[in-house]
Amino acid sequence: MDFLLKSSGLLLLVSLFTLINAGVASAAAPVNQPNIVFIFSDDHAYQAISAYGDSRNLIETPNIDRIGREGVRFNRCVVPNSICGPSRATVLTGKYSHLNGFYNNNTSRFDGSQTTVAKLLQKEGYQTAVIGKWHLVSDPTGFDEWNILPGQGDYYNPQMIRNGQRTKQEGYITDLITDFSLEWLRNRDKTRPFLLMSQHKAPHRTWEPAIRHLGHNKDRIYPEPTTLFDNYEGRGKAESDQQMTIAKTMTPIDLKLIAPNDLSPEQLKAWNTYYDPRNKAFHQAKLEGDDLVRWKYQRYMHDYLGCIKAVDESVGKILEYLELEGLSENTIVVYSADQGFYLGEHGWFDKRWIFEESLRAPLLVRWPKVAKPGCVDQHLVSNLDFAETFLEAAGVPVPTEMQGRSLVPILKGQVPADWRTSFYYQYFEYPVPHHVRPHHGVVTDRFKLVHFDTPDVEEWELFDLKTDPSELRNVYADPTHTPVVTELKNELSRLRTELKVPPLIPKDAYGARTPPQLR
Ligand code: CA
């Protein structure tokens, strides 16, 4: 009896404590603070979202398109450093790589003690979760729930790490991330606002679609980009001397001439049923030269776009959940990717460059009653702005050391008169894996000034996007552009000062085992 009384007393105390806590939390979180669902995929090119209207008409993405149709589609969302980890570090911190310390995917490790948007929102009473691709090496901080892939993660039957505990899952990664995201939404504390970062591995290399999406395109022959056979004339050594071409860099695993090793026997059977006859026909054809490149491009498109089918379905499921729960109106839904990606333009896959297909990420934002439906915005915005945007939306002061700017005024259709007209870019990772030389530069709506700086290549390049949208002609040495070059060099210098870029890059920024010889 005594024990029962004590237990009841304890229970009463626990209940009182819970009530008080709930009271505090709801007092700190007024009902109008919006929820934030941030859906972030990996290497999803804007050319592969139907809303962006690529002339090749590669794929229909009705669910992703819906976010833009019911909200704002940004046409020029650029990234400060076009690779996975650095982009994720920027999203969390609102800072460039040289300030958040995450420069490259080879050796960088995210310092989880720094201020992040997740921590600031959590402190404000938001429930926070990150589910899926993380890729920042250290464990997540600032999240009530984290359920992430180790490193790049596997497409099929992946391991995941849930709040520090490693688990082995069965199924396809995009579906698992979707299911875990929905499960977290269902089980959350419904009295408080939330930040959910649902981050897909897809459509990252090696582009393995869900089994149900093998053959999704019915062996369609995709139009080729006009620059598939680019010979890099008119540009410097950096563009011709890289390792990211469809022709030379793609491996048998990339091309599905070898099956991945993470398939279950049943999945492998379905995989072989699709690929075996096609691979047999390929081997028999003994293709060479341009014909071989063409075949590789077609196989690449089938697989890459197949991955996106499941991502689009995932977005549909999340939107449907929000609608059924009556959450659509007070939830900001963002769809973006960690950078752009080449789908055969310039003969390439991958990213890294300051050039357009790599630099530009898709960005679609729905925020009913705030963001004007159906708007298409052309301003220079960036994933550097995401943290600031979420904080302003939540009514949380933005730390002065963050380097982006809230997009809330633009979403409202009230573009500040002093919105940025230039953007600083800097890439570091070298020489592996793709031998793209470190470079930095400045981007405006019309021009791009780029500086490559390694012992064998010290080059400036200037591109005029108005007359040369595919960036095929370096006009740096053209005397008619001298005034533009002078102006952009001054702007580059101004931006480097404003953004606190150190004059010398730390040696470990390149992520090479033996740091490259650099000036
Ligand atoms: Ca990426």
Image: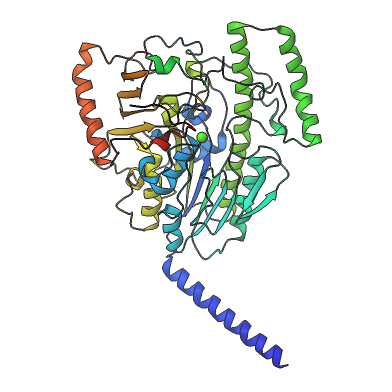
77 left or right, relative to 254: left
- Looking at the rendered image, the quarter that the N terminus falls into is bottom right
Query: Which quarter of the picture shows residue 283?
Result: top right
Residue drawn at x 53%, y 23% as measured from the top left: 349
Residue drawn at the location 69% of the way across and 40% of the way down: 172
Residue 518: percent from left, percent from top: 36, 27
Residue 386 drawn above or below residue 51: below
- In the picture, measured across the screen, residue 4 lies left or right of residue 417, that is right
Residue at 55% over, 75% down = 18
Residue 280: horizontal and vertical position, in percent? 76, 14
Name the residue furthest bottom.
2
Q: Is residue 370 visible?
A: no
Residue 49: x percent and y percent?
52, 30
- Of residues 213 and 123, the one nearer the viewer is 123
Residue 64, compared with residue 60, is above or below; it is below
Residue 186 place in picture, x, y as percent:
61, 57
Residue 25 visible in rendering: yes
The foreground one among 71 and 188 is 188
Up-down relation of residue 40 to residue 441 (above or below):
below
